[in-house]
Image (cartoon, rainbow, N blue to C red):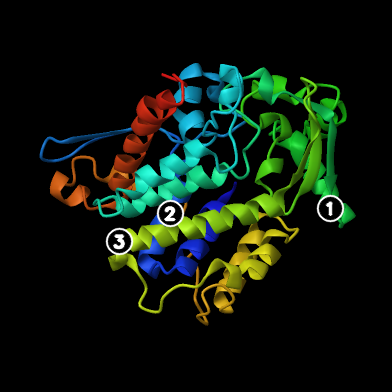
Amino acid sequence: MKIDMHYFGTYAMARAAGVEPNSAKIIATASQYVDEAVESITVELEDGSNIVTFPTGHHMGSIKNRKDDDQRQVWAPFHFLPGGVGNTFSEKMLCQKDSKIARQMVAHHLSYANAPFGLEMIGVTAHVYADTFSHYGFSGFSSRQNRVKTESIEVEIEDPEFKKGVLDSLASFFCKDEAAFPNFRRRFLGDTAEKLSGALGHGAVATYPDLPYLWWCFDYEDNKETSGRKNPETFLEGCKALHAMFTDFLDRAPHFKDDRGGVVFESIEETINGILTTEKNTDGRIEAWKLAMRQGRITQIQNDEIPDHQEGNWTIELKSFDRGKNSEEVRRRSSYRFFQATNLHRTYVLRELLPAHGLMVI
């Protein structure tokens, strides 16, 4: 999923469940920051304490993603949570929509609702959980299970010009040189996309799993059945699951509740479906979320704004601590608490949760 879901959609679902605005913003920022925290950062504080962070995200097309350690430490625990279904290791590593493993992760992380980093933890959880509703059928490891017959990909989009743009995005995902793009586009379908992505994740189908409005299908190279995808349906399931998770979160941590309360998901389901089926680029989809919130069609509160997202703010803040802040102050900042949450999440998933299902990733 992209920022329209990981930040704006997550904020909307948290507010709809009854989370008060400032807390919802922290949750949504943590969810989106999983994709933005792409570097290791070391900070030395004025009292001698140290902070060392590790990445939780990378761009799918980056050659760095092919490193085995990145796949084990980043892609598997944060973006392609293994579903544990199948007979072989590679089959069990495939992400599964709302899997038993995903639900166990959610239950475990909800137990930290009242921890100092509780909001950041539920935001990280929201990112990983939501991704199971878009990344299912693909693995966070370079694997033959991810190989797709590129020429088999078909999309259903009404607007022909917009459809052409979506089709071009499959090639442009791998070609960042605008001058070279036309020639690259012509020969792209003759190559296999997984060679360019290292058969990692859903790289062979670019960003198609992350487009909420898209109806599409494709064939795996290993002759599995054709996968027909109706993204609006699975994204709607994801929104419902997030709303339920945030409702459970508030049951454990009622001090984060908005006094005006929340709404049941069924009362906003039609509105959410309308947003998800909006055939527009990322900015257009973001505006659809903002407009629905502003009009009171999600929280039933008029002029309920979704605050804009400031990309990279937590990275900037964290680096500003170097030799300028003491640990007592820093540990109250969300930019630090986010990494408390991600370290706990990574350790739990890789050292406890996956091994309990027979998956020894590290």
Residue that numbered label 1 is attached to: 157
Mark yes or no: residue 178 visible.
no
Circle nearer the viewer, 3 or 2: 3
Mark 3 and mark 2: Cα distance apart in space: 19 Å
Q: Reply above or below: 275 against 94.
A: below
Question: What residue do we see at 19% from left, 45% from top?
Answer: 324
Residue 125 position, x and y percent, is 43, 46
Q: Residue 293 versus residue 269: which sits nearer the camera?
A: 269
Which residue is at the far bottom? 302
Question: What residue do we see at 75% from left, 50% from top?
Answer: 214
Mark yes or no: residue 58 visible.
yes
Label placed on residue 29:
2
Residue that numbered label 3 is attached to: 253
Comes first in the chain, label 3 or label 2: 2
Q: Reply above or below: 5 against 197.
A: below
Comes first in the chain, label 2 or label 1: 2
Q: Residue 96 versus residue 163: which sits nearer the camera?
A: 96
Residue 76 position, x and y percent, is 50, 29
